[in-house]
Amino acid sequence: MADTKQADTEQSAGTDARAEKHAQRLARQITSFARSHGGSAEGQLAHIARGSTRIALVGANGEWGNLVAPSYEAARRAAELAGLTLHDDFDGELAAKVRTGRYEWSRMAGMQLGGPAND
């Protein structure tokens, strides 16, 4: 019984270490995004398929991007490590900060008006 308990503890420690390493990598990407887009960023976490979590980012200059974390906990930890201000929803105040460009508008219009396919 003691051997099983020790193995479980070691396996859990290894899983925790991998999760922390992944969160640190995501935090570096968040920090890099913020630095490249006006010096700061805000974000929102959303569950997506198979337990993954999307980290939606909006830079101070209005540019936006997404990262995917393997779990909500990893996303939350990465945001914490990067000092990311999180919003509960991607609407209102946060959505108003997003700046879309010609590319996004042409893609949205193209889908509606018979434009190029989304290949």
Image (tube, grey):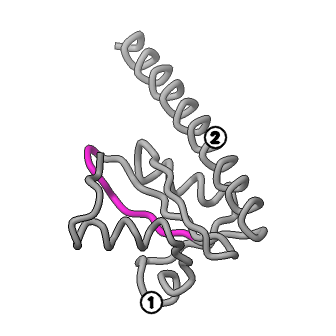
Residue at the location (73% across, 70% down)?
40
Residue 48, image x, y percentages: 30, 54
Pointer 2 residue = 25
Residue at the location (26% across, 44% down)?
50
- Callout in the foreground (2, 1): 1
Q: Which of the two residues, 25 or 74, is positioned nearer the viewer here? A: 25
Q: Which of the two residues, 116 or 18, is positioned nearer the viewer here? A: 116
Q: Quadrant of the C terminus?
A: top left
* Vertical position of residue 30 compared to residue 11: above or below: below
Q: Which of the two residues, 87 or 92, is positioned nearer the viewer here? A: 92
Residue 89, image x, y percentages: 41, 78
Q: Range of the magenta residues?
A: 43-50
Q: Amino acid at mark 2?
A: Arg
User: Horizontal placement of 41 versus 67: left or right?
Assistant: right
Under circle 2, the secondary element is helix
Residue 74, image x, y percentages: 50, 48
Is residue 103 in the magenta section? no
Q: Quadrant of the N terminus?
A: top left
User: Horizontal placement of 8 versus 84: left or right?
Assistant: left
Is residue 47 in the magenta section? yes
Bin the neighbour count of mark 1 within 10 Å (Cα to Cα): few under 14, some 14-19, many 20 and up: few
Residue at the location (41% across, 14% down)?
2
Magenta-highlighted stretch: main secondary structure? strand
- What number is the disc on residue 6? none
Pointer 1 residue = 92
Q: CA distance from mark 2 to mark 1?
A: 29 Å
